[in-house]
Image (tube, rainbow, N blue to C red):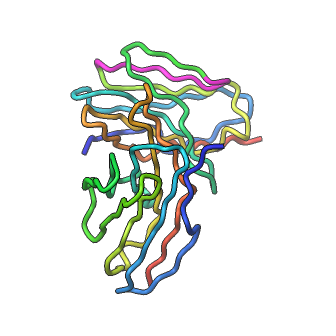
């Protein structure tokens, strides 16, 4: 089982502010890095899947970067809105096609 | 709209009962997974399947079994439910041929074992 650390576990953000959080994972046997958003009472939804060192992906106000050599990924939310309130799950995928999920970053955007 | 459907949103069962959690996907995905989510822990993989009639143990398979008789359906079975199996269960599927194999999740089944 991969040891996946997400920090901070929980954060409150004022509407309009930008924020970011971290996912750390073992860099060995790395294949891909997944980010999912899980809103309360809904299904987790994929945000990004990244594979290459230095990859940067963007979806609206949310973006992510990947460093496979040192084993971390950052997720950024620019100009947070109440609809960004959710738990963001990071999951590295190994060469055996298995994902290991972190505990998540719980984000609450305060209007 | 693509879908992963779990048969029950909430389920209450008694200790010792045999419990079936059903999951159906309409995307013709080869891969299907069962996870459980508990407070303070990440999603943990119970079982997965890469093809019909194929199954592989995940990280926490004890007390569970699975069935994949048809490509679209993946069932999780609790042979004799216990209170420590009270949890949120999530089913997911993915394509084996897509360039990025992102998971599509069901809405989850909150199981309470009394």
Residue B83: x and y in percent read 38, 79
Main SS, magenta region, reads: strand
Q: Quadrant of the N terminus of chain B?
A: top right
Residue A101 quadrant: top left
Residue B51, placed above or below residue A61: below
Whole-percent x, y for residue B15 in the image: 38, 86
Q: At x 56% / y 41%, what residue is drawn? A: A45
B82 sits left or right of B98 in the view: left
Q: Is residue B22 left or right of residue A13?
A: left
Q: With respect to residue B41, does A95 lie above or below?
A: above
Viewer-nearest residue: B108 or B70: B70
Left or right side of A83 for B109: left
| Image x and y of residue A107, in percent | 59, 42
What range of the chain is rendered magenta?
A59-69
Percent coordinates x, y for residue A61 in the rendering: 66, 24
Of residues A79 and A102, the one nearer the viewer is A102
When asked about the image quadrant of residue A28, the answer is: top left
* Screen quadrant of the C terminus of chain B: bottom left
Q: Residue furthest right?
A: A111
Seen at 31% across and 27% down, the residue is A31
Residue B20's place in the image compared with A105, above or below, is: below
Residue at 54% across, 61% down: B6
Residue positioned most to the top = A54
Q: How many marks?
A: 0
Q: Is residue A61 magenta?
A: yes
**Residue lying farthest left?**
A28
Q: Residue A73 sits in which quadrant?
A: top left
Q: Residue at x 37, y 19 (%)?
A: A67
């Amino acid at each position: 089982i991969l040891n996946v650390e997400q920090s901070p576990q929980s954060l409150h953000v004022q509407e309009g502010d930008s924020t970011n959080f971290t996912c750390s994972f073992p860099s060995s046997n790395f294949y891909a890095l997944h980010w999912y958003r899980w809103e309360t009472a809904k299904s987790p939804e994929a945000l990004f899947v990244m594979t290459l060192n230095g990859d940067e992906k963007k979806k609206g106000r949310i973006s992510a970067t990947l460093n496979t050599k040192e084993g971390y990924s950052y997720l950024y939310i620019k100009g947070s809105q109440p609809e960004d309130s959710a738990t963001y799950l990071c999951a590295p995928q190994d060469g055996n096609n298995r994902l290991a999920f972190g505990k998540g970053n719980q984000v609450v955007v305060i209007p | 709209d693509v879908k992963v459907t779990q048969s029950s949103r909430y389920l209450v069962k008694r200790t010792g009962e045999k419990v079936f959690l059903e999951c159906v996907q309409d995307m013709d995905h080869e891969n299907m997974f069962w996870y459980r989510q508990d407070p303070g822990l990440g999603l943990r993989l119970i079982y997965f399947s890469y093809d019909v009639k194929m199954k592989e143990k995940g990280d926490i398979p004890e007390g569970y079994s699975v069935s994949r008789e048809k490509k679209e359906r993946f069932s999780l079975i609790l042979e004799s439910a216990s209170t420590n199996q009270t949890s949120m269960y999530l089913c997911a599927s993915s394509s084996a041929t897509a360039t990025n194999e992102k998971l599509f999740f069901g809405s989850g089944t909150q199981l309470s074992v009394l």
